[in-house]
Image (cartoon, grey):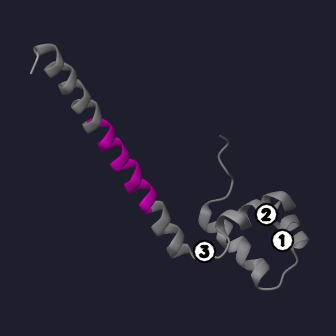
Amino acid sequence: MKKSRFTESQIVTILKEADAGMKVDDICRQHGISSATYYNWKAKYGGLDASELKRIKELEAENAKLKKMFADVSLENHAMKELFAKKGW
């Protein structure tokens, strides 16, 4: 997936310009983005503050860590069940 030229905090700032009253076409022209990109960003980041965005990123990182831990434990559990089945316990 292609990396965006803009960080999430910059995207939130751009969206806030439209909330302040600027026209979407002017914002898109000023920042060099298409109107489709603007509306995709609005659907994804609309109504968020920078602090909320930071919290979401922290939660996503924690969730990824927990998923990895669960996968490791599940794999160990499956291996132990196979071992016990071979031993006849």
Task: Name which residue lies at 60% across and 67% down.
Answer: 9
Q: Would you say residue 13 sits in the magenta stretch?
A: no
Residue 69 left/right relative to 51: left
Give the residue type at disc 3.
Leu
Q: Cβ–Cβ below 8 Å for labels 2 and 1?
A: yes
Give the residue type at disc 2.
Tyr
Give the residue type at disc 1.
Ile
Q: CA distance from mark 2 to mark 1?
A: 9 Å
Q: Residue furthest right?
A: 25
Q: Is residue 46 above or below residue 85?
A: below
Residue 1 left/right relative to 29: left
Position in image of residue 57 (x %, y %): 48, 61
Task: Name which residue lies at 86% across and 62% down.
Answer: 35
Task: Name which residue lies at 53% across and 68% down.
Answer: 53
Mark 2 crowd level (few <14, some 14–19, many ≥20, 10 Å Cα): some
Q: Nearer the viewer, residue 57 or 75?
A: 75
Q: In the rendered image, which quarter is residue 34 located in?
A: bottom right
Where disc 1 sits, the SS reads helix
Position in image of residue 27 (x %, y %): 83, 71
Q: In the rendered image, which quarter is residue 72 located in?
A: top left
In primary-sequence order, the first of circles 3 and 1 is 1
Q: Where is mark 3, residue-wise?
A: 48
Q: In the rendered image, which quarter is residue 44 located in?
A: bottom right
In primary-sequence order, the first of circles 2 and 3 is 2
The magenta segment is 58-72
**The N terminus is located in which quarter?**
top right
Q: Where is mark 2, residue-wise?
A: 38
Q: Where is mark 1, residue-wise?
A: 27
Where disc 3 sits, the SS reads loop
Position in image of residue 15 (x %, y %): 72, 73
Where disc 2 sits, the SS reads helix
